[in-house]
Image (spheres, rainbow, N blue to C red):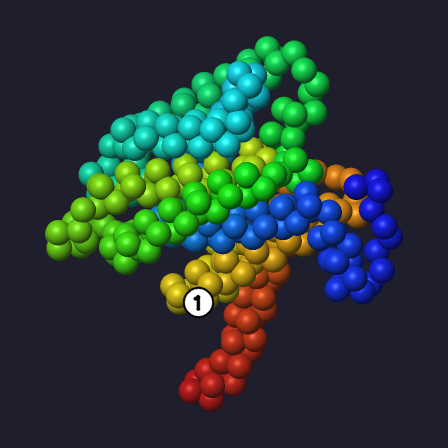
């Protein structure tokens, strides 16, 4: 933001200045909603090893929004329509009866869908006769155009996604950890897999409106991957995922206020830095544990 006042080191004052602008207040509200929804859904994505499906749906957000821009529809309709439709297509392409990530045939089919829809997105962008600012924001994210109605739409969609996850969360966790045993005990593994892909499409459509279509994958996966590196306890890692996603999103908005770079760049950079720190902390803890074990091993020898 070129007109932003200089950073004062008084965070309370800085936030008061930022939130005096309605578009920034909307951006922080939308960011909070997206961080929570993407964090919860992303935690299951990493647990179920469906990051390729998440990446595909994040790519699909681009042609959806580009088509909405070309046709003059609301961007939210393009995001949600294309992402949910693509999620249903991916569900139909699944071949693994247990509902887990499929074999090479399924991966090839998913990649084919991704490539085709990405090409459609570039076609829609080429056909668009207006300024390129809009399509570029679809790719890399922008917080200057978020309206109160978009915040309301994100909130409603987020409540629906989290509500459905609250209902299916326990059996989905069981089916994610051990699908064969879950299926043997009567858990509808295949139906849960389809339902989760639809929820993933909706969450991707939400996050893409903040980070941009090309970088939504980072917000969906990096916080969850970082949390699961730090702890194996499901409840704690889920909570850490939401906290990390919330933190990097708000930090990205804060940085974007002072430096005129794409929001997705800041969000991804902060999330990636935490991911590296988590791996470094785990490696350091393992090294300390080994050093502590050496005297015991020497004494036993």
Is residue 168 left or right of 290 when viewed as pictured?
A: left
Q: Quadrant of the C terminus?
A: bottom left
Q: Residue at x 49, y 80 (%)?
A: 293
Q: Does residue 227 sit above or below 222 in this rendering?
A: below
Decide if residue 109 is in sight here.
yes
Nearer to the camera, 253 or 156: 156
In x, y percent, where is residue 144?
Answer: 69, 38
Name the secondary structure under disc 1. Answer: helix
Q: Residue at x 84, y 40 (%)?
A: 2
- Total labels drawn: 1
Q: Residue at x 50, y 58 (%)?
A: 242
Residue 100 quadrant: top left
In x, y percent, where is residue 114?
Answer: 45, 25
Is residue 183 left or right of 90 when viewed as pictured?
A: left
Q: Residue furthest bottom?
A: 299
In x, y percent, where is residue 8?
Answer: 85, 60
Nearer to the camera, 204 or 96: 204
Decide if residue 217 is in sight here.
no
Is residue 19 left or right of 72 when viewed as pictured?
A: right
Q: Does residue 185 sit above or below 65 in this rendering?
A: below
Q: Disc 1 marks which residue?
A: 236
Q: Quadrant of the N terminus?
A: top right
In x, y percent, where is residue 171?
Answer: 24, 55
Q: Residue at x 42, y 87 (%)?
A: 300
Residue 166 quadrant: bottom left
Q: Does residue 17 sit above or below 98 in this rendering?
A: below
Is residue 128 left or right of 73 when viewed as pictured?
A: right
Within 10 Å of disc 1 (Cα), the crowding (few <14, some 14-19, many 20+) is few
């Amino acid at each position: 933001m070129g007109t932003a006042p200089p950073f004062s080191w008084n965070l309370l004052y800085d936030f008061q200045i930022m939130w005096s602008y309605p578009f920034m207040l909307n951006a922080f509200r939308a960011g909070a909603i997206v961080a929570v929804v993407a964090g919860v859904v992303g935690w299951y994505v990493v647990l179920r090893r469906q990051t390729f499906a998440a990446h595909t749906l994040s790519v699909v957000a681009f042609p959806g929004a580009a088509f909405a821009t070309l046709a003059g529809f609301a961007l939210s309709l393009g995001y949600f329509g294309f992402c949910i439709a693509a999620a249903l297509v991916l569900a139909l392409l699944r071949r693994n009866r247990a509902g887990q990530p499929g074999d090479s045939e399924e991966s090839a089919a998913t990649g084919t869908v991704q490539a085709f829809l990405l090409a459609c997105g570039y076609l829609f962008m080429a056909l668009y006769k207006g300024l390129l600012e809009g399509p570029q924001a679809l790719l890399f994210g922008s917080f200057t155009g978020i309206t109160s109605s978009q915040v309301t739409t994100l909130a409603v969609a987020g409540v629906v996604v989290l509500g459905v996850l609250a209902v299916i969360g326990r059996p989905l966790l069981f089916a994610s950890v051990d699908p064969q045993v879950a299926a043997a005990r009567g858990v509808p593994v295949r139906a849960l897999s389809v339902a989760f892909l639809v929820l993933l499409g909706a969450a991707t459509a939400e996050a893409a409106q903040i980070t941009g279509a090309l970088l939504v994958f980072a917000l969906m996966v990096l916080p969850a991957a970082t949390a699961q590196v730090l702890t194996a306890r499901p409840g704690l890692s889920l909570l850490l995922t939401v906290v990390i996603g919330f933190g990097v999103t708000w930090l990205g908005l804060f940085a974007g206020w002072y430096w005129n770079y794409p929001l997705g760049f800041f969000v991804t950079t902060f999330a990636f830095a935490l991911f590296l720190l988590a791996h470094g902390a785990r490696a350091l803890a393992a090294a300390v544990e080994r050093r502590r074990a050496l005297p015991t091993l020497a004494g036993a020898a």
